[in-house]
Every structure is written in C-alpha cells, then in structure tokens.
Image (cartoon, rainbow, N blue to C red):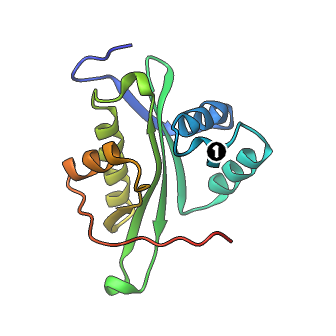
Amino acid sequence: MTISPSPAVTFRAATRDDLPRVVELIADDAVAASRTGTFGAAHVAGFEAIEASGNDELVVAELDGEVVGVMQLTFIPGIARNGATRLHVEAVRVDQRLRGQGIGRLLMEQAHARGRERGCVLAQLTSDKQRTDAHRFYRSIGYAQSHEGFKLQL
C-alpha cells in the first residue's frame, strides 16, 4: 500500500475492537515483540485502565478504514517546571508497509495538538536505544536527546 504525499489519515480514540490490531502493530518490531506478546487478557486489562483514566488516551490512525498507526498519550500533571503538565508519548507505531510516507509525522502532530489542548508545556518520550531509525525520526521533528533514561523491572 502506498499513500499520496498528503494522506487522508484520520485519528480517533481506539476502541476495544481495535485492540488486536493495536497489539499487532506494537509487537511488529524485533525490540517489542517479546515484551508485547500476543493479544490476550492482559492487553484488555491495560486498555480498560487507559480508557478509565482521565489522563491517558490510546489513539489510532486510520487510512481507508484500516488502522495503520497507534500511539498512547499520557498527560502528567506536575510540580516541576512551575506546575507544568507534560505530554508523554508512548508506543508510537506505524504499519511497516507505510513507514517513511508521513504517517508517523502526522501521528506526532496529532499528539502535540492534543497536548496543547490539554495545556501541556512539554512533550517527552522514551525510545529503546536499539531503535536508531526512530531516533532519527524524532530528531527530524524537533525532539532533543536531552536526558538519559533509566528503568528498573519491578
């Protein structure tokens, strides 16, 4: 599938019916496959928690009625930065067949627009060190690699 330079991509909140496709998109990546697993009850529980939260959104991108992208947005109120709210962008994925055609850029523009609507002053994300193509993409849209991230399995 190839899209025109100005794709008719639409964005909407993910529904429970989208969840198998969302999991498929997130897992279609050598880095994330083992961490994501195959669609099951844990994904449904995660979706229900996101859906119930006032500070989380699971957003899908559609092209011609097909879900071709996904991202999770979390709005984090805080004390730092003079009480600023931050937008955290997570699990950004575009169907492999359509990468490099502008859908990722549109997803991120949508994320930033939602952040502004919610009063966020900063957008942030983390990306696995192995995802060099993703890092190049994030730098191309203005993100700076300004911090080191740390994680601890619990």
Q: Quarter holding the C terminus?
A: bottom right
- Residue 4: percent from the left, percent from the top? 25, 17
- Residue 35: percent from the left, percent from the top? 63, 49
- Residue 13: percent from the left, percent from the top? 53, 41
> Which residue is more in the foreground, 35 or 77?
35
Quarter of the figure with residue 127: bottom left
Quarter of the figure with residue 39: top right
Residue hosting label 1: 34
Name the residue type under label 1.
Ser
Write the residue at 68% across / 37% down. 16
Q: Quarter holding the N terminus?
A: top left
What crowding class fits label 1: few (fewer than 14 Cα within 10 Å), some (14-19), or many (20 or more)? few
List the single residue furthest toward the top: 1
Write the residue at 46% across / 75% down. 77
Q: Is residue 11 above or below residue 62?
A: below
Quarter of the figure with residue 86: bottom left
Q: Is residue 16 left or right of residue 136?
A: right
